[in-house]
């Protein structure tokens, strides 16, 4: 996907509430953070993967935990990643890179959590050619990728 306009952290923070965001919306947020250059590929993969979006969640993870997938239910992702960091520091202390990746993701989520503290993006008026100004005016922001709803059961025609 080619993006014609890269958003700043401030722009992204205005559109998402990481204390009440669904797993489906988290995939969209992580994509924006990645394309804005705020996450590296490994961090993006860790943040974008949402198990509840998997079609067989209820039959696998859900069967083990006793909880059904709720991919549209908002949750506090700063709390989720704090718990993940605590777990990794306790049980995966042998590889500090894992906790370091998780810590960076948590720090970024905390920055998004309080957008009032982020400085607004200020662009100084630059002397540009008319053609350049016109091309900037024509830029259209690409729509965010929408993940389709998860279908947990197949219609009769698709069953084995």
Image (spheres, rainbow, N blue to C red):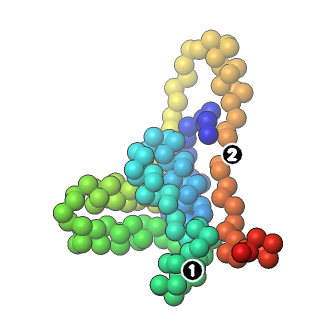
Secondary element type, mark 1: helix
In the picture as drawn, the residue positioned furthest to the front comes out as: 160
- In percent of width and height, residue 16 lies at 56, 58
Marks 1/2 in contact by CB < 8 Å: the verdict is no
The residue at which mark 1 appears reads as 59
Residue 51 vs 5, above or below: the answer is below
| Residue for point 59% across, 67% down | 53
Quarter of the figure that contains the C terminus: bottom right
Label 2 environment density (alpha carbons within 10 Å; few <14, some 14–19, many ≥20) = few
- As drawn, is 104 to the left or to the right of 49? left
Q: Residue at x 26, y 55 (%)?
A: 97
Q: Residue at x 53, y 81 (%)?
A: 62
Q: Is residue 104 left or right of residue 76?
A: left
Quadrant placement of the N terminus:
top right
The mark lying in front, picked from 1 and 2, is: 1
Q: How many badges with numbers are in the image? A: 2
Coordinates of residue 131 in the picture (x, y in percent): 68, 14
116 left or right, relative to 153: left
Q: Nearer the viewer, residue 8 or 4?
A: 4
Q: Earlier in the sequence, mark 1 or mark 2?
A: 1
Question: Which residue is label 2 attached to?
Answer: 143
Can residue 61 be seen in the rendering of this structure?
Answer: yes
Q: Is residue 120 visible?
A: no
130 vs 8: above or below: above
Q: Residue furthest left?
A: 94
Distance in Å between CA atoms under marks 1 and 2: 33 Å
Residue 155 position, x and y percent, is 78, 74
Mark 1 residue crowding within 10 angstroms, few (<14) / some (14–19) / many (20+): few
């Amino acid at each position: 996907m080619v993006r014609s306009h890269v958003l700043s952290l401030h722009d992204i923070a205005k559109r998402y509430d990481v204390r009440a965001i669904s797993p489906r919306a988290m995939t969209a947020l992580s994509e924006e953070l990645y394309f804005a250059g705020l996450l590296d590929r490994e961090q993006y993969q860790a943040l974008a993967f949402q198990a509840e979006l998997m079609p067989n969640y209820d039959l696998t993870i859900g069967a083990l935990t006793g909880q059904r997938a709720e991919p549209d239910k908002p949750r506090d992702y700063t709390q989720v990643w704090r718990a993940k960091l605590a777990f990794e520091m306790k049980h995966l202390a042998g590889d500090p890179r894992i906790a370091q990746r998780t810590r960076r993701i948590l720090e970024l989520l905390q920055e998004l959590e309080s957008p009032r503290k982020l400085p607004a993006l200020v662009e100084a008026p630059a002397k540009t050619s008319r053609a350049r100004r016109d091309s900037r005016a024509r830029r259209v922001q690409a729509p965010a990728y929408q993940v389709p709803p998860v279908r947990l059961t197949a219609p009769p025609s698709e069953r084995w």
